[in-house]
Amino acid sequence: MSENTTEVAAERNLNFLEEIIENDLSTGKYKSILTRFPPEPNGYLHIGHAKSICLNFGLAKKYGGKTNLRFDDTNPVKEDTEYVDSIKEDIKWLGFEWANEFYASDYFDQLYLWAEELIKKGLAYVDDQTQEEIRLNRGTVSQPGIESPYRNRSVEENLKLFREMRDGKYADGEKVLRAKIDMAHPNMLFRDPLMYRIIHASHHRTGDKWCIYPMYDYAHGECDSIENITHSICTLEFDVHRPLYDWFIEKLGIFPSHQYEFARLNLTYTVMSKRKLLELVKNNYVDGWDDPRMPTICGIRRRGYTPEAIRMFAEKVGVAKRDNVIDLSLLEWCLRQDLNARANRYMAVLNPVKLIIDNWEEGKVEYFDAPLNPAEPDGPKRKVPFTKELLIEKEDFMEDAPKKYFRLKPDGEVRLKYAYIVKCTSFVKDSEGNITEIHCTYDPDSKPGVGEWRSVKGTIHWVSEKMSDRIEARLYEHLFTEEQMGAIPEGVDYKDYLNPNSLTIVTAYAEPALKDDKSGISVQFERIGYFYRDPKNGAYNKATGLKDSFKI
């Protein structure tokens, strides 16, 4: 890349992948770009995958290219159509459409022929060593590996054995096909890596046609090459795999796809390992892959996150070359930014205490018009019923209040949101000292829009006791108590950090208009937070609170 091109890119604040792509297009290396998103269908996608999806699809869209969806389905033991379907649903929910849908299994015949070609070139051989023997003989970073006693088999014998592997003559683990490179190479992955292993298992697409399956390092680059992928974008842990990716392409003389790596996404209070997430699901630490505490895309969707918020988050995180840990509060900030402008507002009380207006007529109901969204004061309204007996939050009343406590207290006044000013005259306690009733009088002249406006320092929310709807509210905290889950000591079980208070279920009371909400996104419970009606059980999941702890 020229110095002038670099200067222009810096002025435009491009990330390093955008710089590469713009240079490739400006120099004529490619007329258009083609990226791919290549998930293995062995689990549900998580927020880290969401960043990769936004990056691959976003770059292609920005530069007028396309993105393929290709399932890396080379291990029939772990893969399932359930995961295929969920992955496609997640990508569409995020707002992206793929140009073509492919599977690594589409290329099994071609991959097999290329394996035979490498055997014929003397670049691959069948090894009879066990998996443990291969591991022990690979050596260490400071010591070269030991060549397999089967490494110098003839081309004819290797072809015969490989074809017998394909035809099912041998048991699982009895033989493997390895690339013949260099057992003393400083990159451990070059020490005769495995290309094929025997797995007698039915594949979710090819059935029982195959009993040998290609390894990731062998299949990935070739699949990219078959599709003419111009920019194969992977997370940083694959940087040591790139030379091997290039080696297979070079030795086969096929389309030179190239791999680029960016930093993977790590979040505070979260694990991103599919293995660990699967363990949480299988052992019932969580309620399935879509548990709202999970970092899976289906989990955060069920919690109440929006695709707009996830895309904003991916953009804010950016593209880096070094791994780092992102504060979970940035994700919450992005959700607030999205919902604050468009979420409907309702009042709900989660921890109620009764408030009785003594000078209100028994049986009288008055309705107040309240905007569904303060951003549109002239927009749609909802009607909020006001009656003699109301419910307020327990924390909005204090018997012995400090000086700067501006909510309700003995002889103190507050405004009930959208309604009247009330003054506390007395309160009732039970035998254990808990406040069970608060008695007030209301000021008829304080009705909004009527008479002379009178201001008080405190405003609290409320609902009518008799005319409210009981709802189930699910309050979520971090799934783990440790902020840096990636830094827990070696040998310590990550499950020791599971948060026992990650879910609290309460019975709440909401104004009746809530049940008619058809917005399809989270709503704001005023003064509390954003809540999403769970499509599975009808409960209201707390997506996030109203206060920001992240400073953008």
Image (tube, grey):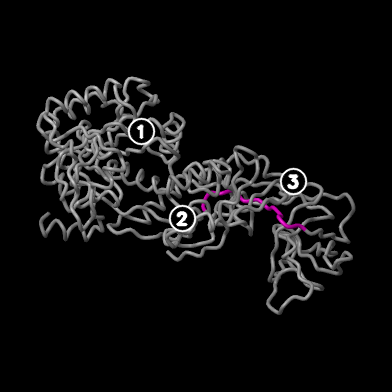
Give the answer, above or below, for where 412 lies relative to 12. Answer: below
Of circles 3 and 1, the one toward us is 1
Q: Mark 3 falls on what kind of element?
A: strand
Badge 1 marks a residue whose secondary structure is loop
Q: Residues at badges 3 and 1 in contact (C-beta under 8 Å)?
A: no
Q: Earlier in the sequence, mark 3 or mark 1?
A: 1
Residue furthest out toward the front: 149
Q: Residue 438 in the image: x percent, y percent?
A: 83, 64
Q: Earlier in the sequence, mark 2 or mark 1?
A: 1
The answer to the question of whether label 2 and label 1 lie on touching residues, with beta carbons closer than 8 A, is: no
**Label 2 vs label 3: CA separation?**
30 Å
Q: Earlier in the sequence, mark 2 or mark 3?
A: 2
Q: Quadrant of residue 83?
A: top left
Q: Quadrant of the N terminus?
A: bottom left
**Residue that carries the numbered disc 2 in the rendered image:** 331
- Identify the residue at horizontal 70%, vertical 74% (top origin): 405
Left or right: residue 488 compared with residue 220? right
Tell me the residue that label 3 is attached to: 470
Q: Which mark is residue 75?
A: 1
Mark 2, residues whose alpha carbon is within 10 Å: few (<14), some, or many (≥20)?
A: many
Residue type, mark 3 in image = Arg
Question: How far from the left and from the top, in percent, is residue 539?
Answer: 65, 43
The kind of residue tagged 1 is Asn
**Crowding near pointer 1: few (<14 within 10 Å), some, many (20+)?**
many
Reply yes or no: does residue 349 show up in magenta.
yes
Vertical relation: 101 (above or below) 503: above
Q: Which residues are magenta?
A: 341-352
350 in magenta: yes
Q: Is residue 254 left or right of residue 213?
A: left
